[in-house]
Image (tube, rainbow, N blue to C red):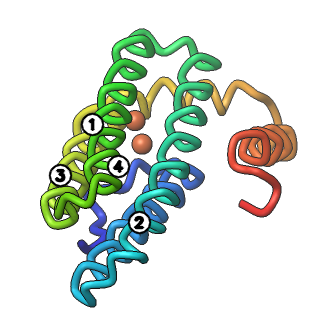
């Protein structure tokens, strides 16, 4: 799956996280092509963890900005996390779901970014702008990202 400019929200920290999710999806594709079941499992776990951190971070930004559809957005994330969880269960039960999972992931991500994530951009960007100077914004973002993703993110 290729990263294309129509997936850019213009909020750098979010775009970097989305690109990383695309990387995971591509690693999954590679593992599938190599018939490497072990790697499929590893990527699945890492991708799941990373998505949950990304969702929590987005939800935090939305809350901080007072985004009006924050509750609906969170419900969409939770719904996806459940779907992913079901795939993980199937994988563990040795069902061959990797290809189906890969197509679900790429379709969902593109759709979610274009429809749901793009919708919060003006308000979240406004929220970030209201934080003060560039340094204050930078400090806040660094702290938040470290809080959700760990220090080496
Ligand atoms: Fe997102
Ligand atoms: Fe989202």
Residue 41 circle label: 2
Of 147 and 42, nearer the camera is 42
For ligand 2, give the image quadrant: top left
Q: Are marks 2 and 4 in contact (CB under 8 Å)?
A: no
Q: State how far apart marks 3 and 2 are (Cα).
A: 16 Å
Circle 4 or circle 1, nearest the eye:
4
Residue at disc 2, secondary structure: helix
User: Which disc is residue 83 wearing?
Assistant: 1
Q: Which mark is residue 88?
A: 4
Q: What residue sits 33% from the left and 45% below the top?
A: 89
Which of discs 3 and 4 lies nearer the camera? The answer is 4
Ligand 2 has an atom within 8 Å of the beta carbon of the residue at disc 1: no
Which residue is identified by label 3? 104
- Left or right: 114, with 99 as reference point: right
The quadrant in which residue 96 appears is: bottom left
Task: Look at the numbered disc 2 and say if its residue's Cβ is closer than 8 Å to ligand 1.
Answer: no
2 or 4: tag closer to the N-terminus: 2
Name the side, left or right, on which 150 lies relative to 91: right
Q: Measuring 59% from the left and 19% from the top, which residue is drawn there? A: 65
What numbered label is drawn on residue 95?
A: none
Which is nearer the N-term, disc 1 or disc 3? 1
Crowd class of label 3 (few under 14; some 14 to 19; many from 20; radius 10 Å): few
**2 or 1: tag closer to the N-terminus:** 2
Please state which of the two labelled residues, at mark 2 or mark 1, is closer to the viewer: 2
Please state, as top left, top right, bottom left or bottom right, where the C terminus lies in the image.
Answer: bottom right
Badge 1: how crowded within 10 Å, few (<14), some, or many (20+)? some
> Mark 4 vs mark 1: which is more N-terminal?
1
């Amino acid at each position: 799956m290729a990263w294309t400019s129509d997936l850019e929200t213009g909020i750098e920290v979010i775009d970097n996280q989305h690109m990383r999710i695309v990387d995971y999806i591509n690693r999954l594709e590679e593992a599938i092509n190599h018939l490497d079941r072990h790697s499929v499992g590893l990527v699945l776990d890492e991708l799941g963890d990373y998505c949950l951190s990304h969702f929590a971070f987005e939800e935090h930004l939305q809350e901080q900005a007072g985004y009006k559809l924050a509750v609906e957005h969170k419900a969409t994330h939770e719904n996806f996390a459940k779907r992913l969880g079901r795939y993980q269960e199937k994988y563990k039960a040795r069902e061959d779901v990797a290809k189906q999972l890969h197509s679900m992931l790429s379709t969902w991500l593109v759709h979610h970014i274009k429809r749901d994530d793009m919708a919060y951009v003006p308000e979240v960007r406004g929220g970030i702008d209201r934080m003060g100077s560039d340094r204050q914004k930078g400090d806040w973002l660094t702290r938040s990202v470290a809080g959700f993703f760990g220090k080496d993110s």
